[in-house]
Amino acid sequence: MGKIRILEANVANQIAAGEVVERPAAVIKELLENSLDAGATRVMIDFSRGGKALMRVEDDGSGMLPEEAELSLARHATSKIRQAKDLDQIATFGFRGEALPSIASVSRFTLQTRPAAEAHGVEILVNGGKILHQKDHGMAPGTRIEVANLFHPVPARLKFLKSDETESAHIIRLVRLYALAHPEVGFLLREDGREIFRSPRQAPLLDRLREIWGRQVAEEVTLMPVFERSGMKLSGMLGRPGVSRGTRQELVTVVNGRPVDSRTMAFALTESYHTLIPKGRYPLAFVFLEIDPAWVDVNVHPAKREIRFRDEAKVRNFIIEAILSVLRAKVESDVGFPVVPTPTLPGALPVSPMSPVPSVSAVPASPLPPLVVPVSVPPVSASPALRLGWRLLGRLREERAVFETPTGVAILDLGAAHQRVLYEKILEQFQGQQVISQPLLVPLTMELEPLAASVLKERGTLLTAAGFNFEEYGRNFWRVAALPFWLEPDDALTFIRDLLAEMARREGDFGKPSLAYDALAKLAVHRARRKGDTIADAEVMELVQALFRTTQPGTCPKGRKTYWEWTDGEMTRRFS
């Protein structure tokens, strides 16, 4: 080990950049937040090659004097806080003073800025952390920052970036979030000079969502009234009952204008939709919470993505109560009669927006009909455990069946058995490259979120081999012309969205075809027969025969038991 010494400033900045600048979208985030802190009413963002080649953020905010501009490139220089106690009540986006020097240390960085009261502005050019020049610059009031050749001083970091399309998708999603959170600011986003979206100032919230997030999402939400209590104010847009997503990508939470990840808010929203969407799925929601900054800790994450509330229970109760009142009103208007709130013990949290059985049945537990696929399949292998002579004795609460076997009694889980049969049938077709595809008489149309669209472009060959046929006809707009045999058209759009979100989340599982097909088959079987689906006795017997032709009849693809058997010997011992 060498002697302890102080790091050079530029090295320290590049180390700090590892936390602040994890990808191009993080640069846009820091610059965009500075624009908002500067009181901008108009922000323009340009980028190319996923932000790797160029990022530019221009605003009409307050601007900086020459000496302030120079000081902004020094570490821990900030106008946002003065002393440690200021951290207890942060009302701005930035406050650490690390962003600009960190970004400038890993790029070719140009800062141009001018306050309205000054006749001209200043330009500072920095390359890899070294200032090349500082000079007067003529420009309109505001600030323009250009970041070129990101990570060229530290090329090893480039290897960890994703494709241009994926990095572009992260930038687009980020700007969407801030544009939605700040309707008082006009946003313009362009990629390679092509306009992605433009949102004027003060547009009505639903119109702004339609412009930024797309028409299909805007049609699935309803505007909620503003709720206020105990220094908290909640507003936003909620997905209609029955509308759900496979991931949290469209469960958007904003606190004091800052898009954040909040476990408290996510739990409150998911719990409020407890009986309105299937278990394991997430609501579609865009929720804005205004709260005293002293109640929020925004300094718990290096990139300020996560926050923590001083009184988590108080915030959670407030959100659940507000959301439940909106959902109850929505359900009442849909079903035509009032819904009685779920009774709770004093101090207990309400967990369901509805109580009486009629109101629950009026809103489907799942917005999709169950997938019904023939259960008979050709033999996958000659299983030595092939069981013949099972005799159906009866049904057990619909989802299970009881059999007499040559050696005892067995209980079969219909859902788990069906999933095993379907899983192996799909895998067999994948491995034999004989996927059965069903062309659609009328193609389905869908509008995708940018990250999902980038995944579809990157994994299009894999999905085509799996039986899908996609046609792009506009940015993030697609036609679905054909589907695999196991996917019903009514289920298709929701399944595709869930699949693309899962592909983005579990990128490694979909890298190699063999792993990808296994992962895709496991996702597909979740569309198999669900609990409570009607199935005739003859189909139950076909299912048993098909199950014991599979390679592993004892478990479903996730390892859950398909059946339990009690032999005559075991029962004799128990009765004796």
Image (cartoon, rainbow, N blue to C red):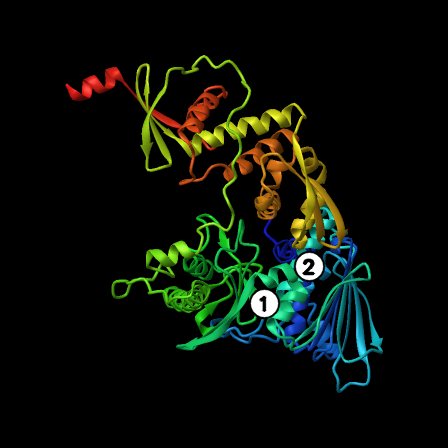
How many neighbours does mark 1 have within 10 angstroms: few (below 14), some (14-19), or many (20 or more)? Answer: some
* Nearest to the observer: residue 360 or residue 455: 360
Q: Is residue 260 left or right of residue 431?
A: left
* Nearest to the observer: residue 542 or residue 202: 542
Q: Is 313 located above or below residue 200 in the figure?
A: above
Quadrant of res 396: top left
Task: Name the residue carrying label 2.
Answer: 172
Amino acid at dot 1: Arg
State which quarter of the image contains the N terminus: top right
Q: Is 99 located above or below residue 566 in the figure?
A: below
Quadrant of res 426: top right
Quadrant of res 184: bottom right
Amino acid at dot 2: Ile
Q: Would residue 157 be visible to someone looking at this image?
A: no
Compare marks 1 and 2 and give the one earlier in the sequence: 1
**x and y percentages locating residue 352 in the rendered image:** 37, 59
Q: Would residue 101 be visible to someone looking at this image?
A: yes
Element marked by disc 1: loop
Task: Name the residue carrying label 1.
Answer: 96
**x and y percentages locating residue 191 in the rendered image:** 78, 59
Name the residue located 62 percent from the left edge and 72 percent from the top edge.
182
